[in-house]
Image (cartoon, coloured by chain):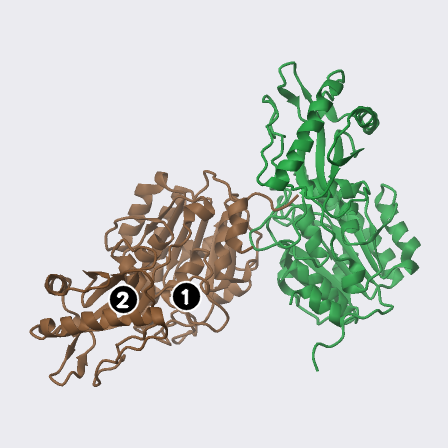
Chain colours: A green, B brown
């Protein structure tokens, strides 16, 4: 019996509320003259106060030594086994723009790019064209391309990115990216690993063959690369498994997509830090689970800018009292993975976790930080267990067995 | 999907190098007037320095409370689930002498012994006869014994030990040892647990029946005991799973055998501590994974000689700068299990682990020792996860999922 089967049997609907505040890529490595991590360096009196009273620990998103993408990281946070529920980039992209994917669809991420007259890629992102130009190009393509054997959908995403979806019975997704990941070479040919994927490959080749002459006149987006072929499979929802009426307060498409994947209500929210928490206040009475996503910790880490990562954490800390004022029974602050500025990339290091709850055992921890979390009462846990703990601390789980 | 399947997908070939220095039976229990473990007692400035900067933790070779043999301990170190990949003593013995086992072979360890004229065992090791006498006896037996229904191979190992291998289709290995583990009694009769093992039992009985009159004239090795009947199954190799070009620098047959089992290049090396590290320097450019095995920590523990165990650790510490000078990206110092001198035997206590890497989170630990390791950033991990961590710290793993 997997964890979901067990939780389904034990969970009950109550009035208690859970806030999951995710600072993307929160975990770090020591940097700078003080040899502290970004989180340890940040002045964050509110989180430190919660840490003193709450439960700390560290969580492994996928497994020891495994560096997760944002998909597996968030699925683990949401309590879904990230090995069992692997989602492809194409599906994430389509979900991010609220595209109503159906079970069995194959979703593909498109990058518009620039090629020279010999077909050599000179810019894999077509100079990051505006989202408006992108939308115009998509409209043009849709007006001209006719595909037989499947329905297709083409939607602009952001800048040079678009989503392509094929809908038909028995389409596979085992096809390589045509993006060679470097400039100075031509796009890669597609290879399908099985019969179902062969069908999808034919559709994609037909699509590309028709798109080529249409794009030829465009500048700089005169070609496209296909990435992340992925079948969409319906996931069991938060409501089905946890009996939670959950919402997502997130600003970036991918995280909205991930939330939608597990059946959360994805809310419209402005672009500022303040907007996230204003939205939380606004909808407080309507839901019992709130996923609040802060992207900029990860962006700063990816840029190798530890000072900026510290600033973002400090900015989040200033919002913490607003959350506390709402009075959630369980308030979790964590990340979906580590993005140490030193590595300028996601990493395998476990993620600091803070659970603020009335029912915590006190531990030695006096602040919220990677070292303090090692001393925490939670220990080192698989990230997918965090949801069971959240439900438990919210007193939403019945006793198991007599 | 097990961990190996996942790692296979994520691992990439890079130039970074990993050294796994195994002090056999490293873990201890407090002994002596200071009530420190052997590792805590040892003066080991080099390891302590690495511990301050690196990541510490403790590892459970098989599971909490389970005392591992050398086989499971090493398989766990090598990242193989020691429950799934249980190897019998016979296979280990045969691999240790570089015998080219084939999938399906049954390997058996032979101990030459001394019996009185009533067949009562008076010495289970035949006075530890010389390897030369052993070889002569094996030659004699081979020249006379004819087995039908299977090929057989008999090879001397060391002192009183030899390896016997039967090769035929459908041979089982569920047969008890004939060694009663004590003197003053006769050898035990064999019992087979299933039909396939019944076939092997008949071969072994035929072999023993022919060996008995031949050995009668020998002194002191006038009989043999059969132990550790074990089928050989081909293992996925280090190269297949981890894309690592691995070598083993070990002095004792069993550890060479274990390394060979996972496809390492087993190198010739002299008998002294210095020889291990001279060999490491010599072959540094040829491999990217180096398993260096120190046996004498375990021997001292088994003898209950804590002072000698301390000395061996101190001797190893003096070699540490030679390893550091080579500049491995990841340098792991650990054991395959604990062998506390107080117990004079392997034990279930978790094993101290030190990972020296550029990408460590600092932790509270100021020295390498069992207590310090409890404070380590690594936490308490299953030993089989150590390889994923080694690959991660060596930046050899791609991100999992988008």
Q: How many labels sit on residues?
A: 2
Image quadrant for the N terminus of chain B? Answer: bottom right
Query: Nearest the camera: A58 or A291?
Result: A291
- Tell me if residue B24 comes above or below residue B288 in the rendering: below
Q: Please name the residue that numbered disc 2 is placed on.
A: B108
Residue at horizontal 46%, vertical 48%?
B241
Q: Position of residue B18 (x, y in %)?
A: 43, 47
* A168 horizontally vs B305: left or right: right
Q: Please name the residue that numbered disc 1 is placed on.
A: B337
Looking at the image, do the residues carrying marks 1 and 2 touch, with CB atoms under 8 Å apart? no
User: Can residue A273 be seen?
Assistant: yes
- Decide which of tag 1 and tag 2 comes sooner along the chain: 2
Q: Where is residue A367 in the image (x, y as percent from the top left)?
A: 70, 60
* B62 horizontally vs B261: left or right: right
Image quarter for residue B300?
A: bottom left
Q: Position of residue A217 (x, y in %)?
A: 76, 15
Between marks 1 and 2, how big is the CA–CA gap?
A: 24 Å
Q: Residue furthest top?
A: A117
Q: Residue furthest left?
A: B217
Labels 1 and 2 share a subunit: yes
Image quadrant for the C terminus of chain B? Answer: top right
- Tell me if residue B312 comes above or below residue A140 in the rendering: below
- Tell me if residue A86 comes above or below residue A241 in the rendering: above
SS at mark 2 in the image: strand
């Amino acid at each position: 019996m997997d964890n979901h089967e067990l939780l389904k049997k034990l969970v009950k609907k109550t009035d208690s509320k859970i806030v999951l505040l995710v600072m993307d890529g929160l975990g770090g490595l020591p940097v700078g003259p003080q040899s502290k991590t970004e989180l340890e360096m940040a002045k964050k009196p509110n989180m430190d106060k919660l840490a003193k009273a709450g439960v700390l620990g560290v969580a492994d998103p996928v497994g020891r030594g495994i560096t997760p993408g944002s998909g597996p990281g968030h699925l683990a946070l949401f309590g879904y086994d990230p090995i069992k529920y692997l989602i492809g980039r194409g599906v994430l992209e389509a979900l991010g723009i609220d595209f109503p994917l159906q079970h069995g669809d194959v979703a593909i991420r498109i990058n518009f790019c620039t090629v020279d007259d010999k077909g050599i890629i000179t810019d894999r992102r077509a100079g990051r064209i505006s989202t408006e130009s992108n939308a115009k190009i998509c409209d043009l393509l849709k007006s001209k391309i006719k595909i037989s054997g499947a329905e297709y959908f083409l939607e602009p995403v952001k800048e040079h990115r678009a989503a392509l979806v094929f809908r038909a019975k028995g389409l596979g997704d085992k096809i390589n990216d045509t993006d060679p990941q470097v400039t100075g070479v031509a796009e890669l040919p597609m290879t399908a690993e099985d019969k179902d994927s062969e069908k999808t490959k034919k559709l994609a080749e037909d699509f590309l063959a028709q798109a080529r002459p249409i794009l030829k006149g465009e500048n700089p987006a005169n070609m496209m690369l296909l990435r992340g072929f992925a079948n969409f499979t319906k996931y069991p929802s938060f409501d089905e498994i946890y009996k939670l009426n959950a919402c997502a307060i997130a600003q970036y498409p991918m995280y909205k997509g991930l939330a939608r994947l597990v059946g959360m209500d994805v809310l419209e929210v402005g672009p500022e830090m303040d907007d996230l928490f204003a939205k939380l206040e606004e909808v407080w009475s309507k839901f019992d689970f709130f996923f609040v996503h802060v992207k900029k910790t990860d962006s700063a880490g990816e840029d190798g800018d530890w000072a900026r990562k510290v600033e973002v954490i400090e900015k989040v800390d200033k919002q913490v009292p607003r959350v506390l004022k709402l009075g959630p029974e369980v308030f979790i602050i964590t990340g979906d993975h580590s993005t140490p500025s030193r590595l300028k990339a996601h990493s395998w290091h476990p993620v600091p976790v803070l659970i603020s709850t009335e029912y915590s055992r006190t531990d030695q921890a006096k602040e919220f930080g990677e070292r303090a979390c090692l001393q925490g009462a939670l220990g080192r846990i698989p990230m997918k267990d965090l949801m069971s703990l959240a439900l438990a601390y919210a007193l939403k789980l019945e006793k198991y067995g007599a």
